[in-house]
């Protein structure tokens, strides 16, 4: 609001003071992504399967990688899932892998999330040595 009006002297000055205080504060540090869980529901017969992939964005020679995948199946007649254990990245269906790759930023190919693919490969373009 403009203070150059007939009643401008009645406008509270506390907003101007608060704006000046905000400038003096240090900016917050940027957020860093450490882990990401991606859940994919795969509709199959006779039961739906649910895959939960844990993607680690931590300290690797290239990143991110899929550290493990849990698989569960839907209990018949309910909306609950029964765990079926962990699977490696290569043991889950290719369509599920592709869906996970779609939502992980900075990943373009299924092989990039495979922790076993690290040998001879580097995300920065080097030879991995």
Image (cartoon, helix red, strand yellow):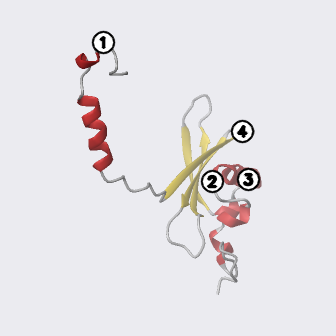
Which of the two discs, 4 and 2, labels the residue nearer the N terminus?
4
Which of the two discs, 4 and 1, labels the residue nearer the N terminus?
1
Which residue corresponds to the image point at 61% horizontal and 28% vertical from the top-left?
A: 77
Q: Secondary structure at mark 1?
A: loop
Which residue corresponds to the image point at 65% horizontal and 74% vertical from the top-left?
A: 124
Quarter location, residue 89? bottom right
Up-down: is 68 above or below 120? Answer: above
Q: Would you name the residue on which mark 3 appears?
A: 98
Comparing marks 4 and 2, which lies closer to the viewer? 2
Q: How many marks?
A: 4
Q: Would you name the residue on which mark 1 appears?
A: 6
Foreground pick, 80 / 8: 8
Q: Give the Cα separation between the discs numbered 4 and 2.
A: 21 Å
Q: Position of residue 93 (x, y in %)?
A: 73, 54
Quadrant where the C terminus sits is bottom right
Q: Position of residue 24 (x, y in %)?
A: 28, 49
Q: Secondary structure at mark 4?
A: loop
- 31 left or right of 125 in image: left
Q: Would you name the residue on which mark 2 appears?
A: 104
Q: Would you name the residue on which mark 4 appears?
A: 43
Q: Are marks 4 and 1 in contact (CB under 8 Å)?
A: no
């Amino acid at each position: 609001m403009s203070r150059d009006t007939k009643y401008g002297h009645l406008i509270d000055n506390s907003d101007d003071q608060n704006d000046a205080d905000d400038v003096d504060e240090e900016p917050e540090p940027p957020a860093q992504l450490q882990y990401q869980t991606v859940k994919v529901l795969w509709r199959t017969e006779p039961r739906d399967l649910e895959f939960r992939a844990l993607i680690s964005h931590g300290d690797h020679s290239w990143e991110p990688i899929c550290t493990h995948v849990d698989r569960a199946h839907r209990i018949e007649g309910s909306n609950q899932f029964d765990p079926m254990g962990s699977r490696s990245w290569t043991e889950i269906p290719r369509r599920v892998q592709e869906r996970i790759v779609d939502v992980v930023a900075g990943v373009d190919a299924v092989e990039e999330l495979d922790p076993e693919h690290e040998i001879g490969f580097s995300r920065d373009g080097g030879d991995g040595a």
